[in-house]
Image (cartoon, rainbow, N blue to C red):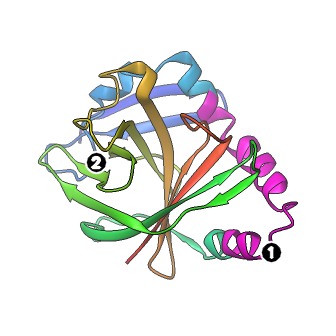
Amino acid sequence: MKKLLFSVAASFALTIFGPATSVYGDGAIVGLMSEEDTLVLDQFDARREAAIAAAMEVADQISTGVLRQVLAGEVLSFEDSYDPSGDWRCRYIKLGGNPALTVYGWFSCRIFDDGAGWVIQKIDGSQRTMGRLYNMPREQLLYLGAIHYAYEVPIWFGDDPTRNQLALLSRLDDGRMRLEFPAPWVESEFDILELAP
């Protein structure tokens, strides 16, 4: 099994796996990550904690209740036998900024293997995303994608650095997944894309 070790920071190293039969990306794209990208990943937990704390102070009990529900669930590992391919319902929860918490309605997402690895794609709504998943020594998978608008052709991470997105994907024991963006492109300080069967 071919390995490529990419040092993000002393406290956050990623091991990217790239066998031809893997459902994960081949690792080459990681060379496109900037120093700022690696710093953002190193600060992931701190950014997440601060954004959640700010969001929980919002007076809207319905929205904070949704956030608690989204954050619930035990994180499971991505085992070799687990296959997330297929159609998912998905919705954004935006944390931080003004307002400090925004819960959007449900849209459609799709996960598929395009031959180079798993791809996540949000396929409707005004703001969309598409990107690949990479293995890590943590329980999450690394997502490297790019944002585009409904009227645009989807692009990949690195095609336009101003559109780059990175996130961590968690698999939960109730069948859901959470794709968490520590440095969203616009509007907020931390985003969660909840994926439900």
Helix, strand or loop at mark 1 = helix
- The magenta segment is 40-68
Q: Is residue 138 above or below residue 59?
A: above
Q: Is 43 one of the magenta-colored residues?
A: yes
Badge 2 amino acid: Tyr
Image quadrant where one finds the N terminus: top left
Q: CA distance from mark 1 to mark 2?
A: 39 Å
Q: Is 33 one of the magenta-colored residues?
A: no
Q: In the depicted view, which residue is nearer to us: 197 or 46?
A: 197
On the image, numbered disc 2 is attached to which residue?
24
Helix, strand or loop at mark 2 = loop
- x, y percent for residue 113: 18, 54
Report whether 190 appears left or right of 46: left
Q: Nearer the viewer, mark 1 or mark 2?
A: 1
- x, y percent for residue 193: 50, 58
Residue 175 placement: quadrant:
bottom left
Question: Tag 2 or tag 1, which sits nearer the N-term?
Answer: 2
Residue drawn at 28 percent across, 48 percent down:
24
On the image, numbered disc 1 is attached to which residue?
61
Badge 1 amino acid: Gln
